[in-house]
């Protein structure tokens, strides 16, 4: 297989066109980001046979790909990852509430300054 064929295969897998072979295959970084899982957890999962993985030649050398759907399914079974996601959602909600309070205080301050 020449370099062009390898790059085409990688692009096909990354674009999700390799769906017939177990879903959308993505790199570890993307899988970790989209599923909320660390790279070390992903490595442990594929080393222990909990998810599949492939090594393909990428533009910067060998790249390991994993099926995104399998990673997300495995992540959804983990109580630890679920708690992490809940905490992250809680922080986002708290930040949104604080932004609203700051906006309200700014409106009040503007009203006080305008009354002077």
Image (spheres, helix red, strand yellow):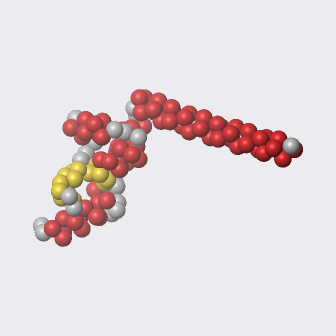
Where does residue 29 sit, x and y in percent of width and height? Answer: 32, 48
Query: Which residue is painted at 59% across and 38% down in the image?
Result: 95
Where does residue 56 sit, x and y in percent of width and height? Answer: 19, 56
Query: Which residue is painted at 64% across and 41% down in the image?
Result: 99
Relative to residue 23, is residue 104 depicted above or below? above
Relative to residue 23, is residue 70 depicted above or below? above
Toward which corner of the image does residue 108 lie, by quadrant? Answer: top right
Closest to the observer, 14 or 19: 14
Query: Which residue is painted at 82% across and 41% down in the image?
Result: 112
* Quadrant occupied by the C terminus: top right
Left or right of residue 37: residue 1? left
Question: How many marks do you count on the picture?
Answer: 0
As drawn, the residue found furthest toward the right would be 115
Closest to the observer, 110 or 71: 110
Toward which corner of the image does residue 24 lie, by quadrant? Answer: bottom left
Where does residue 5 sit, x and y in percent of width and height? Answer: 18, 69
Residue 15 in view, yes or no: yes
């Amino acid at each position: 297989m020449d370099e062009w064929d390898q790059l085409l295969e990688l692009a096909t897998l990354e674009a999700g066109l390799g769906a017939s072979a177990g879903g959308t295959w993505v790199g570890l970084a993307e899988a970790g980001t989209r599923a909320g899982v660390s790279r070390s957890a992903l490595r442990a999962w594929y080393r222990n046979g909990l998810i599949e993985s492939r090594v393909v030649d990428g533009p910067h050398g060998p790249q390991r790909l994993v099926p995104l759907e399998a990673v997300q399914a495995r992540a959804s079974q983990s109580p630890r990852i679920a708690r992490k996601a809940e905490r992250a959602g809680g922080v986002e909600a708290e930040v949104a509430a604080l932004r609203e309070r700051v906006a309200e205080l700014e409106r009040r301050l503007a009203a006080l300054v305008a009354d002077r």
